[in-house]
Image (cartoon, helix red, strand yellow):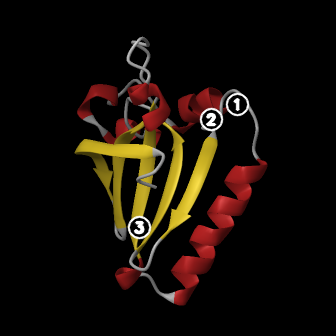
Amino acid sequence: MRDYYRILDPKLGTGAYGEVRKCVYKDNIKDKKSSIKEYRAVKILSKAYMEEKDVRGFQNEIFVMTKLHHPNILKFHHFFEDLRRYLMVMDICEGGELFDYTKSEESKGGFNSFDAGFIMK
């Protein structure tokens, strides 16, 4: 992982088994002439908290992500594993989760499951 990316602060999100952080592709950092920085998200999961069924679910997620190629779906870039963690690098998607938005005060009265279905379609 460290050969290809630099993990940045702060965390973009947290979950039951780990966190999501922003990272930058190192080839873009090395090129001093380029002002383009290719930011991505890295999902970091701790093996210590995962049961066998969780590991199988994560492996399935990786398998599915490697097969998906669509402009409206985050692109999967790399998978890394060390003794303590799984790291999955994908496109960064800012703006939060659709589910969280549907539950927020900002969307009250103006956003329902029909609207979410329309956006997903």
Q: Is residue 92 visible?
A: no
Q: Given the image, on which type of amino acid does mark 3 rest?
A: Leu
Q: CA distance from mark 3 to mark 1?
A: 30 Å
The numbered mark at residue 45 is 3
The correct choice, above or below, for 67 with respect to 118 in the image is below
Q: Residue at x 46, y 36 (%)?
A: 25
Q: Which residue is mark 2?
A: 117
38 to 25, vertically: above or below: above
- Mark 2 or 3 closer to N-term? 3
- Under mark 2, the amino acid is Gly
- Viewer-side label of 1, 2: 1
Q: Secondary structure at mark 3?
A: strand
Disc 2 versus disc 3: distance between alpha carbons? 29 Å
**Dots 1 and 2: beta carbons under 8 Å?**
yes
Q: Position of residue 86 (x, y in %)?
A: 47, 68
Q: Are marks 3 and 1 in contact (CB under 8 Å)?
A: no
Viewer-side residue, 107 vs 53: 53
- Name the mark nearer the viewer: 3 or 1: 3
How many residues crowd around disc 1 within 10 Å: few (fewer than 14), some, or many (20 or more)?
few
Query: Residue 99's image quarter?
Result: top left
In screen coordinates, is 19 left or right of 4? left
Label 2 neighbour load within 10 Å: few <14, some 14-19, many 20+:
few
Residue at position x 41%, y 67% in the image = 45
Name which of mark 3 and mark 1 comes first in the sequence.
Answer: 3
Q: Position of residue 49 (x, y in %)?
A: 36, 82
Which marked residue is nearer to the observer: mark 2 or mark 3?
3
Residue pictured at 70% horizontal, 30% vertical: 121
| Amino acid type, label 1 | Lys
Query: How many labels sit on residues?
Result: 3
Q: Which residue is mark 1?
A: 121
Which residue appears at 58% of the width and 58% of the height? 79
Distance between the Cα atoms at labels 1 and 2? 6 Å
